[in-house]
Amino acid sequence: MVVHATPPSVVHATPELTCLDFSGKTKYNDFRDDLVRDGYAVVKGVLSPEKAYGYTLQDIHQWLEEFGLGYKRDDPSTIREECLPIIHQKGLVQAYGAPHEVTFFSPIVSIGPDSDQTADVDLDLAQSFTWAVRSEPNVIGAFEKLFDTEDLLVSFDAINVSLPNRRDLPEVKPWAHQDQDPERPGFRCVQGFVNLNPCGQNDGGLMVLKGGHLVSKEYHDQFREEEREFRWTNEMYLFKDTGLAWLKERGLEWVKVNCEPGDLVLWDSRAPHYNVAPKGETARFVVYTCYAPVHTATKEDLLQKKQLFETTKGHSHWPQGFQPFIEHFVAPKRNGENDPLNTWAPRKKPVLSERAFKLTGIPYIETMSA
């Protein structure tokens, strides 16, 4: 038997989820049918277009500009490393306090990039663009429907800022993976993001192997003896060419998930997936939004999540909070050195509503047994 290298982060298992019937016998007549059949779903319009554009045109662009490095939203020549915070080639921003970042935008924002119309935006939602998106009632509501409970946790995850024409970054090649331990093959997690910019076929976005979640256990039984690629956590699996060929032989096809500003995209963590960079002129801006029932976490998980929240640190998509970002892995480097602009903290600490604070898990700690 092949002995696989132990990843730096090994975490405990979470319970298998029973909220969906993968036999195909149950019809939900909503996005859950797509999630069961295809392994992914697009929940349309969880944000209005004006809110989505507000987060994009004001919050994220303003946040980039306020680093003071020279980035200007209307000047494509400033889309280069020296004018920006360090952004991973895949668009991930896990540092700079992004999981809890706060910025205050104007209460009047443009409805769209090509529109002269404006709309009022609730200033209460302007206190943190990451937390504002996580706190949106329709975003929370989709996960309440999915898991059939209001008692939810949300991840303190990254944002994705994929600017077009980044010729100063390496090419983003397909990196098909599952964000789930192959030794724990059941239905355990639904990942998600709220899309904030138009996302068509030539724009940066998510690629999913349609239906791949349904053959995950069979796949891993077949490839159990194959040596695995290095991964930072046991809750991740990187596919090799041999495995991708096996999936292709079963007629499974890759799909680019296109969506509109304000759409929520969901996918089963067992589904092979990866992201692609923009080919056109449109930036990709998303806030990752992954929720799970509170009962899937331990008291120890929530105590750690409390500490992460109080120190404004981030963690992976697992909402239980048992997987903090390993800072020496994700620390942004500028000219080979740690970027001095990265303090791991937001410019201001977020101020949360009562509903959003419950999503941190902190109010549930005292009611949980050890």
Image: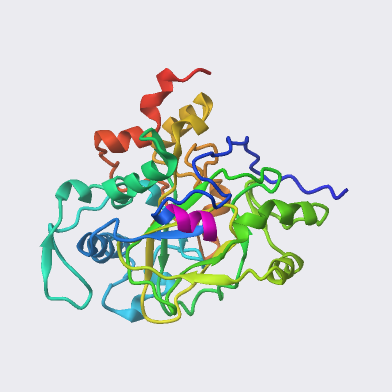
Pick whichever, 319 or 215, lies toward us.
Answer: 215
The part of the chain drawn in magenta is 32-38
* Residue at left offset 33%, top offset 72%: 198
Residue 152 lies in quadrant: top left
Question: With respect to residue 358, does 118 lie above or below?
Answer: below
* Residue at left offset 48%, top offset 80%: 167
Considering the whole magenta stretch, tell me its main secondary structure: helix
Q: Does the image show residue 347?
A: yes
Pick whichever, 27 or 110, lies toward us.
Answer: 27
Is 162 placed left or right of 210 in the picture?
left
Question: With respect to residue 280, does 270 lie above or below?
Answer: above
Q: Position of residue 88 (x, y in %)?
A: 50, 63
Residue 76 lies in quadrant: bottom left
Pick whichever, 184 or 342, lies toward us.
Answer: 184
Is 345 placed left or right of 105 in the picture?
right
Q: Does the image show residue 136?
A: no
Question: How many numbered markers are drawn?
Answer: 0
Is residue 237 highlighted in magenta? no
